[in-house]
Image: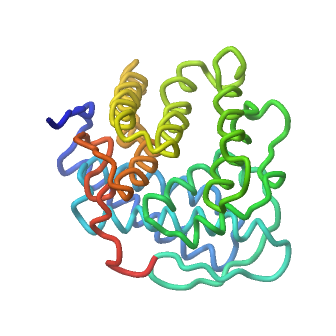
């Protein structure tokens, strides 16, 4: 029996479509500017993620190529952000929006941090882009650290866990346990508790079930994650109208891993756009 988790309502219709199209146009201009200067690549990545969420509002199943293109562009810009901040001089060639662009290097930036890394990695997983997953996983953890007080320590354990899993480094189990322990609400103090428990922790729990090959426990954990996501994003009117809540990016990424491993996923939810989860668009064009 399929379990349905209904997504909370967002305004749709012509206004929502015009909003998404306007974001697309602005993003195209931002991408063109990157060839002259990468100084604003962090805001361009944020704009790309906003565009993806806006597309998913009007296309909750990701059934149109425009939604897939917005997903790929967000991935490409997120990966480019870490490429241009990884070197101090020269240029970096990055494929963005169907062409290879030469972007000036800008060296280390505070926005190229662990939180941004997680967003870029989730997008790489969703797009099944193994080369970019490898490139992101090879970034030294020290390069992603922010000034003390910016993040709870668990986030660095979490990045280390994901990098170690993908690159098949040793001590994965110990690193995952350290992540779980450091993300406990009695330990983590910087992230708001409701955000930690409803948005930040569920992908960790899902990954725990995935790496243990817990095929019976994964789907119930995914249902819980989506319910928590919905609860968080409907707590008040401001959150309910924030399109960031239109998809559950972290749970979607881990669900993609589970789907590709043939886990039973009898769950239907617009928080997990069907055609992103089921990799319908993979191979449509080079990413």
Q: Identify the residue at horizontal 31%, vertical 51% (top origin).
A: 56
Residue extending farthest to the left is 1
Q: Is 96 placed above or below 176 here?
A: below
**Spot occupied by residue 267 in the image (x, y as percentages of width and height):** 24, 39
Residue 165 is situated, as x and y percent measured from the top left of the image, at 62, 54
* Residue at (49% x, 69% y) in the render: 129
Residue 60 falls left or right of residue 202 = left
255 on left or right of 92: left
At 37% from the left edge and 27% from the top edge, which residue is drawn? 224
**Rendered view: 59 above or below 265:** below
The single residue placed furthest to the top in the displayed view is 186
Q: Quadrant of the N terminus?
A: top left
- Image spot of residue 49 (x, y percent): 48, 53
Residue at 81% of width from left, 72% of height from top? 87
Quarter of the rendering containing residue 231: top left
**Compared with residue 259, is residue 226 higher up or lower down, i.e. above or below?**
above
Q: Within the image, what quadrant is residue 189 found in?
A: top right
Pick the residue in front: 213 or 227. Answer: 213
Residue 164 seen in the current view: yes
Q: Position of residue 37 (x, y in %)?
A: 70, 73
Classify 234 as above or below 245.
above
Residue 17 seen in the figure: no
**Protein image colouring:** rainbow
């Amino acid at each position: 029996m399929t379990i349905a988790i209904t997504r909370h309502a967002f305004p749709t219709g012509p206004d929502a479509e015009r909003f998404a199209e306007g974001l697309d146009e602005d993003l195209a201009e931002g991408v063109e500017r990157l060839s002259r200067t990468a100084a604003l690549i962090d805001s361009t990545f944020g704009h790309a993620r906003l565009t993806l969420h806006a597309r998913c509002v009007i296309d909750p199943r990701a059934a149109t190529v425009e939604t897939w293109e917005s997903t790929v562009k967000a991935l490409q810009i997120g990966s480019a952000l870490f490429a241009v901040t990884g070197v101090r001089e020269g240029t970096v060639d990055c494929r963005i929006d169907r062409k290879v662009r030469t972007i000036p290097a800008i060296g280390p930036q505070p926005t190229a941090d662990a939180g941004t890394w997680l967003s870029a990695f989730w997008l790489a997983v969703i797009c099944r882009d193994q080369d970019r997953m490898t490139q992101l996983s090879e970034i030294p953890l020290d390069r992603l650290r922010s000034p003390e007080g910016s993040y709870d320590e668990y986030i660095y354990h979490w990045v280390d866990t994901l990098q170690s899993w993908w690159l098949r480094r040793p001590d994965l189990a110990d690193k995952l346990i350290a992540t779980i322990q450091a993300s406990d609400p009695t330990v983590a103090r910087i992230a708001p508790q409701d955000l930690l428990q409803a948005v930040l922790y569920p992908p960790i729990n899902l990954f725990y079930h995935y790496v243990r090959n817990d095929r019976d426990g994964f789907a119930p954990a995914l249902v819980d994650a989506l319910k928590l996501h919905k609860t968080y994003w409907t707590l008040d009117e401001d959150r309910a109208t924030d399109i960031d809540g239109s998809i559950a990016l972290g749970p979607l990424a881990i669900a993609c891993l589970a789907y590709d491993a043939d886990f039973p996923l009898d769950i239907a939810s617009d928080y997990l756009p069907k055609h992103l989860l089921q990799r319908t668009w993979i191979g449509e064009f080079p990413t």
